[in-house]
Image (cartoon, rainbow, N blue to C red):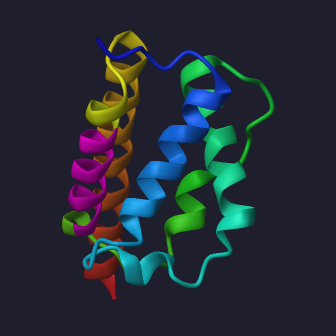
Amino acid sequence: MKKDIQTKEDIARLVNVFYDRVLQNEKLVHFFVHLNFEEHKPKMVHFWSFVLLDEPGYNTNVFDKHANLHANSSDFNEWVSLFHSTVNELFEGEKAEAAKFRATTIGYTFGSKLDALNNQA
């Protein structure tokens, strides 16, 4: 039996494995190759710690950070699918399910907004 996401270390493991997979995913890699992952990963750990562990202090507008990616709902569907498979491989339990639910919500929201923005151009 796998354990649930319980600590910031668990979230760091999830983020590390997930982004390693993103960088191997031919549909998603081009969105991330320019990032300095030594700077980016701690931000993602902080975000998911805020979401799943109620860690205070995260106040970045996450959508604004993604608005200029030229991504669409298909790209975010791929991101969500990869996130779900990573969570499923590493964890199970209430927080793992919450992580997948939040990722699905984020992916749908961002994809829909970006589709709308792209259609205005």
Counting the numbered discs, the total is 0
Q: Residue at x 72, y 23 (%)?
A: 55
Magenta residues span 75-86
The part of the image, by quadrant, that contains residue 76 is bottom left
- Tell me residue 66's x, y (percent): 51, 67
**Outermost residue to the right:** 57
Asked if residue 68 is among those painted magenta in the image, a careful observer would answer no
Q: Residue at x 66, y 27 (%)?
A: 8
Q: Is residue 100 above or below residue 96?
A: below
Q: Is residue 28 above or below residue 22?
A: below
- Tell me residue 111's x, y (percent): 30, 60
Q: From the viewer's side, name the closer residue of 13 and 35.
A: 13
Q: From the viewer's side, name the closer residue of 20 and 34.
A: 20
Q: Residue at x 48, y 40 (%)?
A: 14
Q: Give the position of the C terminus as an image quadrant.
A: bottom left
The part of the image, by quadrant, that contains residue 96 is top left
Q: From the viewer's side, name the closer residue of 4 and 32.
A: 4
Q: Is residue 33 above or below residue 59?
A: below
